[in-house]
Image (cartoon, helix red, strand yellow):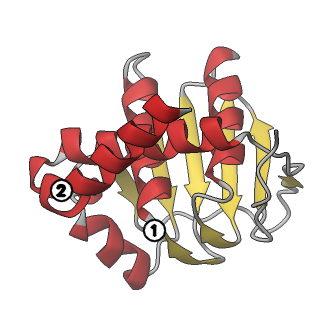
Amino acid sequence: MPADKVSNDPIFYLSYEGVGIFRIDGRGSMNNVHLFMEICKEAINAGHKRIVVDFVNCVGIDSTFMGSLVEIDEKIKAISGELLLIQVNDKIKDLLAMLGVLEIVKIGCSLSLPKDLLLVKITNFGISDMERIKLIHRSHKKLVESNPKNIVQFGNFLKALEAELKGL
């Protein structure tokens, strides 16, 4: 059964010369991260070794989205690729730093996308409650694995998610 939560915050994508290019508009959150993760997976499977994520229009990011960045960074590095975040504002940088994500992912400080680059809005699709819980669990587990200090913040949350997964 599809979950009721679908995000009004769009994610745009373009495959350009072997690079997967994303732009996050509004918030990157647990409500749209499945779109990002699915297209990243497709891009990597298609042989893209570089993924660029443009945060120029991003006003916020939650821990689930941050954990997905860690997961994608790990997957792309496994094929000798690179995840690059660009146009990241100070608020987003502070959030990424707070959970140790900035120690893992790379930010291209002076890079921006050409104005005439036409990215396409990823068609929003539902995700089952179980798949959403699995994705949220996986993202937070990545945050703890990448920075053990995060267990203080997410330990009980992870236990609750694991209990919910066992009950489904």
Up the image or down, 101 lies above or below 104; here it is below
Up the image or down, 4 lies above or below 14; here it is below
Question: For mark 1, does the 10 Å Cα neighbourhood hold few (<14), some (14 to 19), or many (20 or more) residues?
Answer: few
Query: Does residue 145 appear left or right of residue 32 in this picture?
Result: left
Q: Quadrant of residue 93?
A: bottom left
Name the foreground residue: 80 vs 96.
96
Q: Which residue in the protein does label 1 denote?
A: 110
Cα distance between the residues tagged 1 and 2: 29 Å
Is label 1 or label 2 in front? 2
Determine which of the numbered discs, if any, sits on residue 102 in the image. none
Q: Which residue in the protein does label 2 denote?
A: 150
Q: Is residue 149 visible?
A: yes
Indicate the position of residue 111 as horizontal and vertical percent values: 52, 63
Name the foreground residue: 12 vs 86.
12
Q: Is residue 105 visible?
A: no
Q: Which of pointers 1 and 2 lies earlier in the amino acid sequence? A: 1
Query: Label 1 amino acid?
Result: Ser
Residue sitting at 51 percent across and 36 percent down?
134
Question: For mark 2, does the 10 Å Cα neighbourhood hold few (<14), some (14 to 19), or many (20 or more) residues?
Answer: some
Name the foreground residue: 79 vs 36.
36
Q: Secondary structure at mark 1?
A: loop
Indicate the position of residue 141 as horizontal and vertical percent values: 31, 40
The N terminus: image quadrant? top right
The C terminus: image quadrant? top right
Indicate the position of residue 31 as horizontal and vertical percent values: 66, 59
